[in-house]
Image: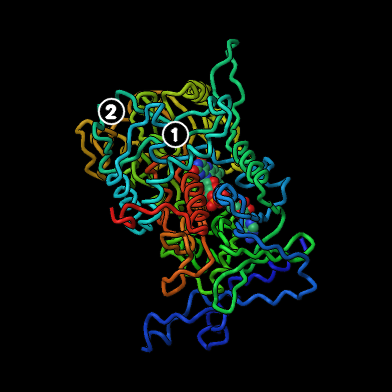
Amino acid sequence: MGTSEEKLTANVSRRGFLKGAVVSTTGALAAAAAPYSGFGAGEAADTCEDPYAFLEPLPEVPEKDIVSTITKDIIVVGAGNCGHVAALTAVTEGASVLCVEKYDKEFFYSERGDIMGGGYPQEVGTVNSRWMMKRGAPYIPYEDFANQWQRQQASRCNPDIIRDFYRHSGETIDWLISDVSDELMSQAVGFMCPPTPEFKAAFPDNSIGGWYSWIGSIQFFTKFEKNPDGTWPVRKRFWLKICQQHIEKAKGLGAQFEFGQTVDRLIRNDKGDVIGCMAFDSSGKYHKYLGSKGVILACGGFEGNQDMVLAFANQQNLYYFGYKKPTSAMPQPGTGEPIEAAIRIGALLHLGPTGTGSGRIAELPFRAPYPQFNGNGERFANEFTLSGYAAQYQPDGLYCQIGDNKWREYMKLMPYGHGSIDVVNPAFEYFAEQVEKIVPGDPKGGYVPWTGGAELNSEVQKKMRSNTWCANTLSELLDLIGYSGQPKANILAGIERYNRLCAKGHDDDYGKPPQLMWAVDTPPFYGCSGRSSKSTGSVTWSGGLAVDKNYNVRDRDCKPIKGLFAAGNAAGGKMVLEYGPVISGIANGTAITTGRLAALSALGRKPASKQEKGE
Ligand SMILES: Cc1cc2nc3c(=O)[nH]c(=O)nc-3n(C[C@H](O)[C@H](O)[C@H](O)COP(=O)(O)OP(=O)(O)OC[C@H]3O[C@@H](n4cnc5c(N)ncnc54)[C@H](O)[C@@H]3O)c2cc1C
């Protein structure tokens, strides 16, 4: 990939980054970005290195290498979940649109394609959509939702994004599926996990120790019911099919899609407004795309850009250098060139921490907060909250989780959060069959897919795989997992203590809500082990460009950069600390919603809020 490779090798290495940072204090790189002036003219300003300054200016593209120039109203960068919706919105509104996507078309739509192609996103979470409410999803009240979202993210999110998501995500998904055939949509599943009578009795106001999650997610899986001969059908995901349909629809309305071109720079006019971008193709030639009404960055995050991660993703950075080198990362397509380009012209990143840092943690397939123990055999967290963070601080990141044969009942108390298993769906029967296939005492254990039988991209499958062992005694189970000596004795004692706390109905150690304190006492027992340092990243990216209420990217004085918009994972302030479990599928839900609103904003048609209308 000609220029793409040059670009990759031109990317500064970690050493280069450090060197660059030192040079920047002498002013040599100061031209790359406006110097940070927050400290005024004091001593601090002299010693403070501008974290944005490591990005060196890109060399000018010679005129001879620019092979096309196209002008449209709107240029969308990235055709993923956010970008294709932005393009469809803009063209539906009558604007002329060009959407430029770095992957070539074949890869983009293929099984291996990272997001759209692999078609991973199977759950799309939105608020109060007609589709979900018709199927019995309860109305979600605004104050509860907005406050819970901020609470789960330490109040660091962009309140306008939360408000927009609450107000417009339901109508966005209803609009997107309005032209999908009834036949296909009849396959979709409203993710109702689990509102069982048991859940309602245990948590009558939906609060699990102050944590809430709501029903709002549609699963785009084909129906999964046992065949009359006792076999199971192959369960297919079809969100990708719907996205493709929308790309074709946008094309039919006149939108232009260019695949296999990577945007790496923005074009500004004399006033500093963004008026376009440049993208290179596989032959290294450049294409100039001018957008008279705006350029929308819908390029995902920058999780695949090591230099950016090291420079800005504080959580990943501390983790990477302070702990263990990760051996894998979740596959996501965000290489962040357009975000680099925005930073080069003075854009601000939304304050973090940036980047999810919990890593993948091995869990029992039940997605229930059974007790976890570290490599020394000590329990270390309330397993209902995100114990993955606490797991990182265990020696060697090692831990295990131990469950028992009450899993069917225990799972009925799981909230509606991302990754919970829908116990009222026929897919649960499939899940249960897979669990029961694990033979007690078998040293090989077994693997239970958490997707209810849906096909997963094989790469993802490998990364998410974690073994589950089964045994009739706890001692035998710990042998199978690989614990021995004092750590094994500690776990056995720890389970006894945990069971005493369950009997008392009070987790004196870590405060797990009493309704979830179920003794581990009924054989066969189940166990899995994990090492939290194995991978970084998560299924979405937290952190991106700071945007205002119109999705206009902010400069470092927090003023909008005219002509430049960001949405989806390219915009920061959605989920700042972690993938929020407020509604399952919220990553994709925010991508489609903010993509649509950014397009409407660029066209000056974003619906005004009641506050703005003075109502
Ligand atoms: C395994 C996995 C499972 C997931 N499951 C779910 C789920 O069930 N529900 C859910 O809500 N979310 C899920 N997510 C997360 C969700 O897919 C993302 O949060 C969402 O896709 C973000 O949308 P986006 O459009 O901002 O970015 P993306 O969908 O990543 O799209 C960005 C696009 O921009 C393109 N691009 C990048 N750089 C450039 C460039 N320089 N020039 C041109 N184009 C560029 C990329 O190729 C890509 O096509 C999952 C993610 C993973 C990895």
- The dot on residue 527 is 1
Q: Position of residue 440 (x, y in %)?
A: 48, 24
Quadrant housing the N terminus: bottom right
Type of amino acid under label 2: Lys
Is residue 333 in view from this perspective?
no
* Tag 1 and tag 2, C-beta contact below 8 Å: no
Question: For the point 34% across and 41% down, which residue is it?
Answer: 384
> What colouring style does the render use?
rainbow
Is residue 223 in view from this perspective?
yes
Question: For the point 54% across and 28% down, which residue is it?
Answer: 185
> Does mark 1 have its CB less than 8 Å from ligand 1?
no
Q: Position of residue 282 (x, y in %)?
A: 77, 59
Q: Secondary structure at mark 1?
A: strand
Give left or right: position of 401 versus 89: left
Q: Quadrant of residue 299?
A: bottom right
Question: For the point 55% across and 57% down, which residue is it?
Answer: 303
Picture mark count: 2
Q: Quadrant of residue 125?
A: top left
Type of amino acid under label 1: Gly
Q: Is residue 463 above or below residue 496?
A: below
Q: Is residue 491 above or below residue 137?
A: below
Q: Nearer the viewer, residue 39 or 570?
A: 570
Which mark's residue is nearer the viewer, 1 or 2? 2
Q: Nearer the viewer, residue 269 or 460?
A: 269
Residue pointed to by mark 2: 200
Answer few, some or many: residues within 10 Å of disc 1's Cα (few below 14, many 20 plus, some between 14 and 19).
many
Q: Position of residue 62 (x, y in %)?
A: 76, 76
Q: Is residue 506 above or below residue 542?
A: above
Q: Nearer the viewer, residue 150 or 498?
A: 150
